[in-house]
Image (spheres, rainbow, N blue to C red):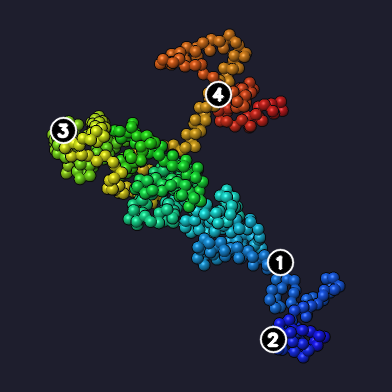
Amino acid sequence: MEGSRVCKSCGARGKFIVTDHDTGNSVCTSCGVVQDFDNFQAHIGGINGPVGTYVRVGTVGSGSFYSYKETKIYEAQKVIEDLMYRLGFSATKSSEVKHMVEKITEGEYGQGRWFSVLVGACSYTVMRQDLKVLPMEEVANLVGCDVYEMGRMIKRVVDFLDLRLPEFDIVNSFEQAIRSCPSFREVPEDMISRMLKQGVFLLQCLVNWFVTTGRRPMPVVAAVLVFVAELNQIAIKMGDVASELHLALKTCKLRYKELLERLVKVAQALPWGKDVNMKNIMRNAPSVIQYMELKSMSNCNDKGNGSECAVVHDLNYLLGDCLSKESLYGYAVYGSENDSQYFNGENSRALCIDAPERLQLCQESLSMIYSELKNEVSIAKESSENGYTSTRKRREYDILTFTDWWKGESELSRKLLLKQILEKDTGLNATPPSFDRGCLAYERRREKIYAAKLRIQRTMDPSAAAVVADDDKNDVSVLDMGKKRKRKMQFDIDWEDFIIETLLLHQVREEEIEKGHYNALLGLHVFNGGS
């Protein structure tokens, strides 16, 4: 057999082809090449036939054998180690996560997508117990699931282990977000420190205004991040921040809008508050935030009593602080002499540049000052457009150019407990947004109930309904003012109106209908009325 073989490499025959006794392969002694297809063994006889020389099912290496359970545990540990590496966990935290997974699965571990979600939930729980920041959105993004699925798994882990997680720290989340977002990497460290204090102040004001109540906290963090960036003239987009924090862009925009709306409400206490709206709030934001900071430092313990005194005092201090900055605001002696008509007291002529707290200002005086400043701004714009320049020292009105409006002296600029935050006065007594929406829903249902009662009365007693209709028409004619006469209001009837009519016909009380639990009321009074 060997004499008939020819080497595939050098073509040698006969004595040059020998058999290796260890492996059973034919080798050419001339060139040292192992010949192919020389040691083939066929499997004959089914599953009980001879096994191949190098192939054995279930073996890895020489003499090892892994069962299904051992293979499953090995793959599960690889999943845990991979996620711990991507999250940047230390060896101690990784061992805690492994121990928690092992305790929950009773040492069986698992395979598939649900196991990855379980590992992510355990990672979040371990970090939350240690008061460390780990956003749920980041874990869900690494695992490959949505936030809702991750939240459900975290709840199951907490319930199974009977744990009590500490309160979510939104301040630490904001600090980590501003330092980890790629959009803020090129911002100087001193500006980051300034933005941190401003952001913590606004975040705790939002907590005081119940904006974070019942909401996911990270969209609020993203909204404050974008706001303080714009406040410090840093160009950043909401979409970039939402993408970097793995958040829904629509939710972040809603929280940003709610922040602006509440700042506009706070600005109404200022003399020029009626001119502040959603479009120009960024220009007035420094004054509004400074006013909020002064309010939070006031000594009034009761938010309701004595607030009028605090408002006047804070406005006096705010305006005096603005007028005392001659180099920034350009307020010359000439202006102080002309504007002395707005101040009361013997020393009103000197404007009190060195001691602005001596001024005795009233709301009417502040309004007059603001009106005159506003007129001067319009005159200055017209003069600049026509090419004229004023010899008088010009006042600078772009408040965003001033860098010293932020004091950071309020306690709200530092991390406080929830009880301490709620005790602070921030210039606005707000209610939770869900409560406001609930009140609007109640009002809408009352209107629908009233309209349904009119339709029922019109059907059952047309003569009485005509009298009511005439009264309504007279009321509408009194309210009609202007050249165009308003058309008669037409209401569209939808499924909710039909349900309200049905409930009213079944003698259901209006107070119960106003709550909006239509399914329960229909099942109790309509479908099960005879039982």
Asked whether, in this view, residue 513 is left or right of residue 427, the answer is right
Say which residue appears at 18% left-offset and 36% top-offset: 390
Numbered mark located on residue 29 in the image: none
Closer to the eye: label 3 or 2: 2
Check the picture and name the quadrant holding the C terminus.
Answer: top right
Kind of element beneath mark 2:
loop
Mark number displayed over residue 32: 2
* Residue 298, visible in the rendered structure: no
* CA distance for labels 1 and 4: 65 Å
Residue at 71 percent of width and 25 percent of height: 530
- Whichever of labels 4 and 3 marks the residue nearer the N terminus, that label is 3
Residue 489 location in percent, x, y? Answer: 51, 18
Mark 3 to mark 2: distance in Å?
110 Å
Q: Nearer the viewer, residue 270 or 237?
A: 237
> Disc number at residue 68?
1
Where does residue 317 sit, x and y in percent of width and height? 24, 40
Tell me the CA gap for discs 1 and 2. 42 Å
For label 3, the residue is 338
**What residue sits right under mark 4 in the picture?**
448
Q: Residue 279: name its quadrant.
A: top left
